[in-house]
Amino acid sequence: MSQTATTSKRKSRPRWKRRKDARHGEIVAAALELFVERGYEATKLADVARRAGVTKGTLYLYFDSKEALFKAVVRETIVPVIVQGEALAQSFTGSASELLEQLVRQYWHLVGETSLAGIPKLMMAEAATFPELTRFYYEEVVTRGHRLMAGVIERGVKNGEFRPVDVMLAAKLAMSPLMHATVARQAFASCMPEGFDVRAYLNTHIDLYLHGIAKP
Amino acid sequence: MSQTATTSKRKSRPRWKRRKDARHGEIVAAALELFVERGYEATKLADVARRAGVTKGTLYLYFDSKEALFKAVVRETIVPVIVQGEALAQSFTGSASELLEQLVRQYWHLVGETSLAGIPKLMMAEAATFPELTRFYYEEVVTRGHRLMAGVIERGVKNGEFRPVDVMLAAKLAMSPLMHATVARQAFASCMPEGFDVRAYLNTHIDLYLHGIAKP
DNA sequence: ATTTAGTTACTGAACGGTCAGTAAGTAAAT
DNA sequence: ATTTACTTACTGACCGTTCAGTAACTAAAT
C-alpha cells in the first residue's frame, strides 16, 4: 500500500465522467441485451448497470424502477421499425408482389438480424406480467404491422395480381413465418450450429406465398 | 368456534390425506399452469404447492428442486403429442395434401386448444436458462416435428402432387404459422376480445399453402 | 374389536442468500 | 463555493430450500 489509494495526488484522469445526455440510451441498450438474454426476472439491475458502465444507484436517476426501465426498452426500440416499414409502403410504386417481397426482406434486415430481434421473444415471454405494455405492443406493433401488410395485399387483390382473400388473415400468414423465425432463432440459437439458412428460408416463403395467393 | 378445531372428537374428516400416487401428476399439472402464466422465475413454489393442494415441503418429496420440477413439466407433457402425430402419418393412406391438412388440424386439436399450448411459449421464454432441456426439446419436439412434416411433403413431391421444393424448408413453413399462432395466442389472449378466428386462420393457411406448393 | 408399536406422507416454521430500492457521501463540473 | 451526477454502503423483503415434528395410515398383538 504505497500510494495507490491516495486521492491527494492529482493528475490521474477522473475515475468517472458526468455524461448526463448519453446515459439514458446506454442504459436502455444494456438493459435490452440482458432482458433478452435472461428474461425480466432473472435480469439483475446490478448487471445492467455494469454493462452500461455505471452503478446501480445511477439507474434510479434515470428510471423510477426496474419495471419502468423494462417498459422504456420496449417502447423506445420497437416503434421506429414500424414507422420505417410504413414509409417504405408509402413511397413504393411497383407491383404488390414486389412490395410484399421488399417488406419481408426489410423486416429481416431491420429486425431479424439486429439486436431488435430479441424484442418479440421478450414480449411473448413477459406479456402476462405487463398487461398494459402488452396492449401497447399489440396495438402499436402487431396490429399496425398487420394493417401495413393487409394494405399491400388489398392493393394486389384490387389490381388483379392476387386472388380474392381475407386480407387481414393473409397479412397475418405473410408475417407469421417471419415472426416465428425471429423468436425461434433467439431461443434455439445454440441448437443450430451455423444456424439455418435464413436467406433460403425467406426465399422459399416468398415463393410459396406468392404462388399461393397469385391469381391462376 | 364450536367444535371445529378439536382433534379429540373423532369423526371430523382428516386435515389432509395420504395420496402418494396422485401427487406427482397433480404437482406437474399445477406447475405447468403457473409456469405458463407467469414464467419460471416469477412462479413461486408456494403457489404451485397451494394449487396442487399440498404445502411447499411436499414438493421436495417428489422433486429435487424447482429446476427439476420445471424439466419434468416439459418432458412429461410434450413428447406424447409428437408420438400421436407420427402414428397418424404412419397409418394414413390418402394423398399428401389431405395428410398435410389432417396434421395441421390435429396439431391444433391436440396442442393449440389444450393446456399444452403453453409449452412452446414457455420453452421460447426460458430456453437460454436451461440449455440442456432446450437441446432435448429442440431434438425431440422441434426437429422431430419438422421431419414428420418433411416426410409428408416428400411424398407429395415424389407422386407429383407438389412442385419440387426443399422439403425441410417447406416443412418449416407449413408449421411456422401454427407455432406462431400458438405462442401469440398465449401472449396476447387478453388483447383479442373473443380472439381471432382460428378456424378461418387455419383454413386460409391450408388453402394458401397447398396452392403455393401444388404443381401447376 | 381394540390397543399398540411402527412406518411414512405431509406440514409449518425458520434459515440464509439474493436483490430491488434508498440515502448518505464523494467527486466532477461550473 | 455551489451544484449535481455519480458512487458506495446499507436495508428490508422475498423466496428456494431444509428439517424437526405431526398426523395419517398399517398391521401385529391382544
Image (spheres, coloured by chain):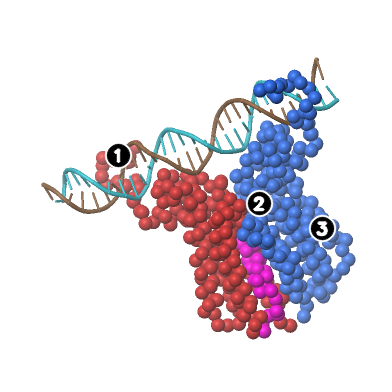
Chain colours: A blue, B red, C cyan, D brown
**Dot 3: what SS?**
helix
Q: Residues within 10 Å of mark 2 (few under 14, many from 20)?
A: many
User: On the picture, is B22 further left or further right than A53?
Assistant: left
Q: Is residue B154 above or below residue B71?
A: below
Which residue occupies the foreground of this view, A112 or B11?
A112
Residue denoted by label 1: B6
Kindly identify the residue that appears in the image at 48 percent across and 56 percent down: B72
Q: Can residue B169 be found in the magenta stretch? A: yes
The mark lying in front, picked from 2 and 3, is 2
Residue denoted by label 2: A122
Q: Quadrant of residue B21?
A: bottom left
Q: Residues within 10 Å of mark 3 (few under 14, many from 20)?
A: some
Image x and y of residue B139, in percent: 57, 64
Image x and y of residue A187, in percent: 63, 56
Q: Is residue A140 visible?
A: no
The mark lying in front, picked from 2 and 1, is 2
Q: Quadrant of residue A52?
A: top right
In this figure, what is the number of numbered marks? 3
Look at label 2 and name its amino acid.
Leu
Kindly identify the residue that appears in the image at 85 percent across and 70 percent down: A95
Q: Residues within 10 Å of mark 1 (few under 14, many from 20)?
A: few
Q: Chain of mark 1?
A: B
Image: magenta residue range: B160-184
Q: Are marks 2 and 1 in contact (CB under 8 Å)?
A: no
Look at label 1 and name its amino acid.
Thr
